Image (spheres, rainbow, N blue to C red):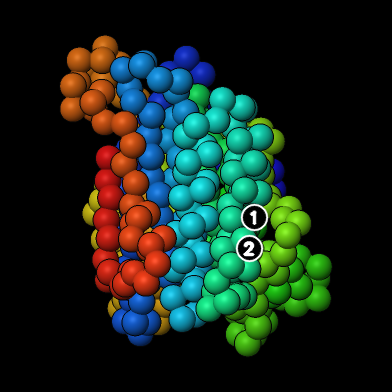
Amino acid sequence: MTARVANARVDATLALRARGAMLTHVGRVRSSNEDSVVFVSSPEDGRLEDRGTLALVADGMGGHAAGEVASALAAEVVRRIYCSSSLPVPETLRTAFEAANAAVIQHADAHPECRGMGTTCTAVAMVGGKLYLAHAGDSRAYLLRGEILTQLSEDHSLNAQLVREGVMTQEEAETSPNGNVIVKALGSRAELDPAVWSEGLPLADGDRVLLCSDGLSNLVPDREIAGVLQRLPPTDACDALVERALAAGGYDNISVGVFAIEVPTAPDRAGSDRSSAARTTRRIVPQEILAEGSDARGATRRIKL
């Protein structure tokens, strides 16, 4: 785990849940949305093994609709494997990413119009009061604890790699023309080594978790992101962050997920909240993206729990 997170008093006896929302927008320039997002939670009535909450952002690459195929395919494979696996969370996430990588490559091999497609994928599993990260690419995961916003993921881009190696300063990286060169992504090569946390980060009541594509992080400064997360509940925060990215130019697709970590109310813990207990899986990967000849140009898609 590379991120250094602000300390917090963590009570391991508290049952925590993630309440959140996700929003994806085509932006002001692109004609299609190559991002895909997923947000699924286990039922709260104990009928199935508790897999907690899985959320991910995938930012497709390849053009000519291939990018949106890659992101949707990867997101669906990761979702399906995570929800059906009984393995420990880190092993499940690694298996899911490797399977998604293979699926993107196989699809590209079978469809010449999709050759060269790939996708970033940043996923968090929040289960048992801990957060686990799996990541490839330059989409990001953040944690807001108190007033401190910490980037949990490490960008797999050429500029970020040069900064880590001391070849380039962060200031130079921000103006370098190589900022969009991705050095690790699903579909780029057969052997994928995603960043997967072997241990979970203990969560605390009041934490906020953010997932986003670079359509947000490239345009909205961290201090503005932190301010929004501090002030607004998840659905409103998603709206506000997308609006800020659009106001800053919106030259890329924009995907945002905001999750409030909190102690469930008494009805939730007692299982008497029928509306919460009844839900099983909510996802936003549109199945039509995976269909041959489909038009997946929706400008805005939203999901919340």
The structure residue drawn at horizontal position 48% and vertical position 41%, both measured from the top left corner, is 80
- What label sits on residue 105 in the rendered view? 2
The answer to the question of whether label 2 and label 1 lie on touching residues, with beta carbons closer than 8 A, is: yes
Q: Residue at x 72, y 56 (%)?
A: 192
Residue at 50% x, 24% y: name it.
128
Say what secondary structure mark 1 lies in.
Answer: helix
Residue 208 position, x and y percent, is: 41, 44
Left or right of 29: which side holds 214?
right
The residue tagged with tag 2: helix, strand or loop?
Answer: helix
Which residue lies at the image location 46% right of the left edge and 50% below the top edge?
A: 76
Question: Given the image, on which type of amino acid does mark 1 rest?
Answer: Ala
Image location of residue 69, percent across then percent down: 46, 66
Residue at the spot of label 1: 102
Say which of 76 and 165 sits in front.
76
Q: Position of residue 32 (x, y in %)?
A: 36, 76
Is the residue 155 above or below the residue 100 in the image? Answer: below
Please state if 271 lies on the left or on the right of 197 as rendered: left
Is residue 16 among the parts visible in the rendering? yes
Where, by quadrant of the figure, is residue 202 drawn? Answer: top right
Q: Residue furthest top?
A: 270
